Image: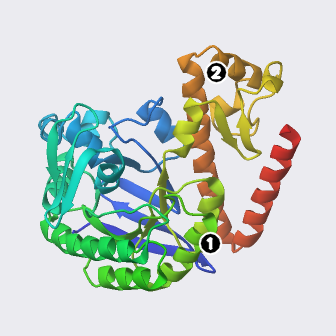
Amino acid sequence: MSQDFSFAVHAADGAARKGEIITPRGTIRTPAFMPVGTAATVKAMFPQDVRATGADILLGNVYHLMLRPGAERVARLGGLHEFMRWPFPILTDSGGFQVMSLAKLRKLDESGVTFQSHIDGSRHHLSPERSMEIQHLLGSDIQMQFDECVRLPCSDEEAERAMRLSLRWAERSRKAFHEEKGRAVFGIVQGGANKALRVESARALSDMDFHGLAVGGLAVGEPQAVMLDMLDTTVPHLPQNKPRYLMGVGAPDDIVEAVARGIDMFDCVMPTRAGRHGLAYTRFGKINIKNSRHAEDARSLDPASICPAARDYSRAYLHHLVKAGEILGMMLLTQANVAYYQELMAGLRNAISEGRLIDFIAETRAQWADGEKASL
């Protein structure tokens, strides 16, 4: 195991945990939400503004970075942290999901995936070994195994085929991981919506000496009830002493439900994508700032927010910026959304420490409902 990477649980409330992941580049407070910096940038935000929202860690992506600007180039320029001016922890997704969802003319076999770039049609081969090599070149602090993610719904046969292939790829990824001080590698549980497959995957990965385990293949088209059922099935079979990461999740309501089930880490493009399209996430629920009812609304998104974008600008001004297509509107709404997600995570951590998570979730949901009702 790599030295100077550790995880400790400091408080629990039911299945929910409050803890810390320690890395040489900084401490990650859990439960944690990782803003998505897919191509070495959190879209529409300066790195220092991302940090000011309370983010401890960002996510980057192998698929996008290997295509542009290239992992070898990033390495020559000092690594991903130096390249994007983010000196704090970075987790890199292995690229498996993007290969399946974005690449053209892909061909999958035991060795990996051969595909054409969605950017220029150039041909590439991504294997467990190459994915780990790219993540090593990027210099990320937490690296993910290469896996195959199938969309739901799918047949049990398809889910089993992908799960077993992902387990074989997990063994190869673990072997190819460059053991360096402070670096970590996580395995990824697959199995579609089949409980037996999820349990088998979780148990097999738990025996492979990963530093943490992720639950993948959810939030890919299935109802929330299915996602939560898979978490209820899977989490009890994950190690208690290692961080648990639910990949690609998600909406605030999904996050609070998953935290209550023992998940420690999350990522999703939702807050940044919504911000670029005129939708704000607040403690009062979602606000569609494009709606004409905001055209003369002098209130801010949230006068009590610690985020200047949410606190100091009127809804009328934000409405004007969005309707005019001004870049500043995208920037302010993105910053407000990322800040709200971090405020939500801080609230969840405090509630776990105080043993009042159930009450906090109920109060949060009631405030969302009241706020969205008032917006109708």
Residue 350: x and y in percent read 64, 63
Task: State the residue position of label 1.
Answer: 260
Residue 345: x and y in percent read 59, 56
| Mark linked to residue 333 | none
Residue 365: x and y in percent read 77, 58
Q: Taking the image as drawn, is residue 180 in sight?
A: no
Mark 2 / mark 1, whichever is N-terminal: 1
Q: Taking the image as drawn, is residue 86 in sight?
A: yes
Q: CA distance from mark 2 to mark 1?
A: 36 Å
Judge by depth and name the residue closer to the eye, 116 or 135: 116
Tell me, yes or no, whether the two marked residues, 2 and 1, touch with CB atoms within 8 Å: no
Q: Is residue 340 left or right of residue 270?
A: right
Task: State the residue position of label 2.
Answer: 322
Please state which amino acid type lies under the numbered disc 2: Val
- Location of residue 283 with respect to 165 vertically, above or below: above
Please state which amino acid type lies under the numbered disc 1: Ala
